[in-house]
Structures are given as C-alpha cells and as structure tokens.
Image (tube, rainbow, N blue to C red):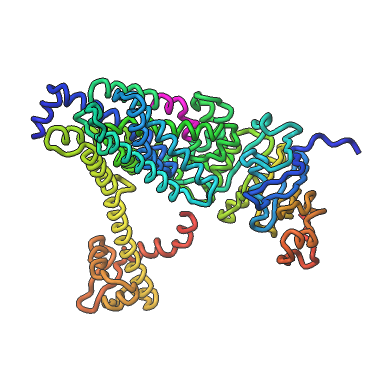
Amino acid sequence: MVASLLRDLVADHTVRTVALGAAILGIVSGALGTFAVLRRQSLLGDAMSHAALPGIAIAFLLTGSKAPFVLVAGAAIAGWLGTLVVMAIVRSTRIKYDSALGIVLSVFFGVGLVLLTFIQRRPDASQAGLDKFLFGQAASLLVRDVVTMAVLGAAALTCAALLWKELKLLAFDPDFAGTLGLPIRVLDAVLTGLLVIGIVVGLQTVGVVLMSAMVVAPAAAARQWTDRLGFMIVLAGGFGALAGVAGAILSSEASRLPTGPTIVLCAGAIVIVSLLAAPNRGLVWTWASDRRDRHRLRLDAVLADLYALAGQHGTLDHAHPVPVLEAMSAGHGVSESLRALEERGLVRQRGDEGWTLTPTGSNEAERRFRSRSTLEEGA
Amino acid sequence: MPEPPAPAIEVADLTVAYRDKPALWDIDLAVPSGVLMAVVGPNGAGKTTLIKAILGLLRPAAGSILIHGRPYEEQRRLVAYVPQRGSVDWDFPTSVLDVVMMGRYGELGWVRRPGRRERELALEALEQTGMHAFAGRQISQLSGGQQQRVFLARALVQAARIYFMDEPFQGVDATTEVAIVKLLQELRGAGKTVVVVHHDLQTVAEYFDWVTLLNVRRIASGPVREVFTDENLRLAYGGRVAFLGSDGRPPEA
C-alpha cells in the first residue's frame, strides 16, 4: 500500500496538488503556532479558526464567489475580529480570558453554522461545497488554492523571519521589550495577524473545527526535542508538513475519511511519539533516568548503612543480616542492592550470618561518606 | 551650596490607578544621580507600579516623569531594567547567552540580528556576574540565583546610566545576594544611579545610601540616615514593624 501511495504521489496530479497544499499548511501553521504555544495562547487559535466560519459564509453571500482568495479574506477578517472581541471582553469586563475565548468561539461558530445552512437552502446550485470548511476536504484543493496558500504562507513566514528578534523578545519578556521602546501592542497585533494567516491557510484542507490542532500539536511536539527557538520553529514546521501530507494522502486516497480529522490524527501520533521518546523531556527518558537514580541511591544507602555498622562495631569482620539492613534503609530491594555491590567487590556475604564491607568497600565508603558534606556544598 | 545638576529621576504628581483603585497617589520624587536607592513599603504599596510607570509600561492617570531632565521616550538608552525573575517563563527555549544579548536589541534597531559584537558584550557581562561558564546553558537549568544573575547581565549590556531592579534579592541565596550587592555598589561607584525594589528592611541601611518609603503615597525619600527612621517606617507600614537596632535607630552604614 505504501509503495502504491508513493507511486500515486509522484504520478497523480491531484495527489501532488493535495500533498503540496497539505505540506504548505503544515509548515505555516506549525511554525507560526510555535509563538502561540510559547506565549500560552494555544486556545486563541481555536477561537480564531471557529470564528472564521461566519467570515467564509458572509464573503460568499456578499460576492457570490467561491474564489479561494475571497473566502480566505473573509475567514481572516472574521478570525481577526473574533480575536479583537476576546481582547475587548477581557479588557472591559470581569470575564476572564478562557471564558471570553469560549464565548467568542461558540457564538461566532454558531453564526457560521446558521449562515451555512441558510446558504445551502438557497435555490441556486452554485453554493454547494462550502461545508467542506467544517471538516476540511483536501481532495477539493485546486492548483489556484495551493498558490493562494503558498503566497500567504510565504508572506507570513517572511514577516516572522524579519521580525525574528522582536517577536522572540515579545514572547519571552514583553515588559522588557516595552522598556527598550518596542511597540508591544503593534507587535502583538502583528503576531496575532500572522497566526490568523497560519490558520486560514489551512481551513479548506483541515476545516475550522480542528484547525487549532495544527497550531498547537506540531509546536508542542517540537518543544520536546529541542531547547532552541529557531530549531523548534523549523521542527514544528516539519512536523506540521509531515502530518499534513500523511493525513491528506490517507484521506484522499486510501479511504473516504474527512481530511481534517485524519491530518489531526497524524499530528496527534507525532505528539505522542515526542512525549514518550524525546531525549531529556520524554516520559521514557525521565522514567529510565529516575529508575537509574533510585537504583544508585539505594546502593549508596546500603553501603552507608554497612559503613555505619562497621564503625559501631569497630570491625569489618562482623556480618549483618539483611533484615537489619532493611530496617535501616527503610526500604525493600536490599538483597538486590547487596548483590549489585557484591559484583563491584564492595561487599561480601559471610555464610548465613549476613553481609559486611570488603576492605575496598570500606575505603570507598570512607571516601564517599566522610566527604559528603563538602561534596554537597560543591554541588 | 552650588546648584545641584538635574536629578537622574524626577517624578511629579504621579498618580496611577487600576480601575478605580489608586495604586500610586500624587507621588513626587527626585532621585539624585549616582545613588543606590531602595524602594521599600508593604505589599501593595505600589513599588513595582512605580517602576513600571517610570519605565512607561503603565499609563499614569496623571503626573510627569523626567529622566535626566527629559521625557523617558527620549532617554530610553540611558535606562536598564531588571524585571522580577518570576515574570518570565524560564522554560522558554533559549540559552543564557541569548537572553543576555536581548539587552542589546534596543541598540540594534529593527530587523538587524545580534552579531559578534553583541556576543562579546554579553560574554563580558556574564563574566561580571560570575555566569561566564553558563553562557551556553539552557535557561530552564538555572537555579533562582543564577536566573537573577542572567537578568543582571542583560541589564549590564544595556550600558545604561540608570538601573531599575525589581526585587533582585527575591529567592536568591546568601552568596548570590552578597555578589549582587557588590555589583550594585560597583555600579554606583561608576557613577550610575541604581533603583532597587527591596523587601528586607534589615539590610536597607547596610546596602543602600538612599531610600524611598512608599505606601500608595510617598512617605519619605532621601538619604537613608535621614529618612529611614522608626517614625517613617511606622507611617509606611502602619505601626506593624518594630525591629530596628536596640536604640530604635537603623544601624549606621
């Protein structure tokens, strides 16, 4: 199946268009979404994309045209307006940010659904197909759609690249940016505008309902793999493109699935892999290093206990049974730790009586635990 | 006595309000050049608000602010700012060196990226704050004291004449506190003016030579020896503090 898909990809004009469109949408939304995620505005993307729906409907009602540029412009204006309404609600009422997002999202989306139904009930047949903006339909992408997406996306990414250090400072420390004389409100508006573009670019392919996932998921996944903002943005764009292409091809070729959900599932898979497997931050990594640390600490505890006992008895000849050590270390796994220490030649078993330090173990313990206080100061 | 030069900071009739609640009421302040000044007062007294208003981050309801005799907008390059450590997300994907170079962004202007010169200045500032070895470190791996030193280094590369610092001693250990104080005193020694929002009344007399006591209104402002008195502290804190030296006077610096 994979081989045939790849062959189709190269040969089939439609599939090529779809894949290209999905890649563009993934790159643009992933890269620009990085800023939203870092500024903790992930949900703003959700409100924007839902708010774009009435814009699409109104643009069609006013112009009667389904040209991508017209509809995208309508979506962008409505998404932008939605954002402004959120800000205005937060500023002038006691309603908090999350509630304001919820209100705007649902009200705009509701208006959009009503308008969409109204349009579909109209007698003229030319209106059909606007509902693809709900869940997305990659198969409907035409070359002119892809060109529109590419132009908008390139413009947005160029703008972000030019304002790179200003946007970075805005995301990290807006107050400091303000004291340097950067116009924070303007930059904030620019960044919001870029995010709107990142979203409308993907609406036809992914749909308004799930588009916000393409803003959040690639960036969240990318954060797992890197500590550099620049690389994070590149990686988020790459993840977005991967999810977009995989999802679009799966949905338009292998089955009759709606494109949006398929793309989002692919993005979700990338996030899950990243959460689990990324070095340093990944769950598997943390789990393994926690385990390693615990194991080492247990060994240290047993060694320290034996050392303390040897000190009390004044000799290494006196062996101590496991239950005594278990009581001292207040934990299980003592036998296991003793065997691990034995392998390193630090302790030995004396018949049935129990365990004692070897001379090497005694030296090691002396060196480690006598100087513990100084070590901790240095650490 | 000769006429003193224009004060480093001159605040007149400054009032700032959040909704209907005044955070600062009719503040007059003149901070002479070259002093190391503490801003003290109880929680909610408006200490941070005062700094943010001076830096133009808040729009005052009334009043005027002059930096070396001119409005702040014209004097930005003379001013450096160290915000509260907790005001940023330290898990942001960036390195220590990167954060310090941000202090040069104002000088760089639009579009231009920091280059070799910015790098050198940043490394120099990190050297001064004892953070040189951490230049390449991801900022989430820093301790509280190290974060504070990074922020100080970022202010140092601004090569300013006036430094505003919001609680630089918040949550740092004793060693770092001593190092920071030494740095602040070096700045004063170099003729800079340093304004520090401070919480620990015990150390005011030891660290600073100038103090402003604030509680929405200005209680007092002047040399520590003259204005850091029991009387003024009672006015600022509402009689809730009694801790000064046994003679009831702050210890002499």
Which of these two is toward me, A83 or A70?
A70
**In the figure, A13 relative to A51: above or below?**
above
Q: Residue furthest front?
A: A123
Part of the protein shown in magenta: A157-168
Residue plotted at (68% across, 29% down): B74
Q: Position of residue A36 (x, y in %)?
A: 41, 39
Numbered disc total: 0
Give residue B96's position: percent from left, percent from top: 48, 40
Q: Residue at x 13, y 28 (%)?
A: A6
Q: Main secondary structure of the magenta part?
A: helix
- Name the quadrant of the N terminus of chain A: top left
| B92 relative to B130 in the view: left or right | left
Left or right, B122 with respect to B236, comes to left
Query: Where is B26 relative to A34, above or below?
Result: below
Q: Nearer the viewer, residue A321 or A175?
A: A175
- The part of the image, by quadrant, that contains residue A159 is top left
Residue A93 visible, this angle: yes
Res. A223 in view = no
Depth order, front residue of B87/A33: A33
Query: Measured from the top left, where is residue A102 in percent x and y?
Result: 40, 48
The structure residue drawn at horizontal position 25% and vertical position 35%, both measured from the top left corner, is A121
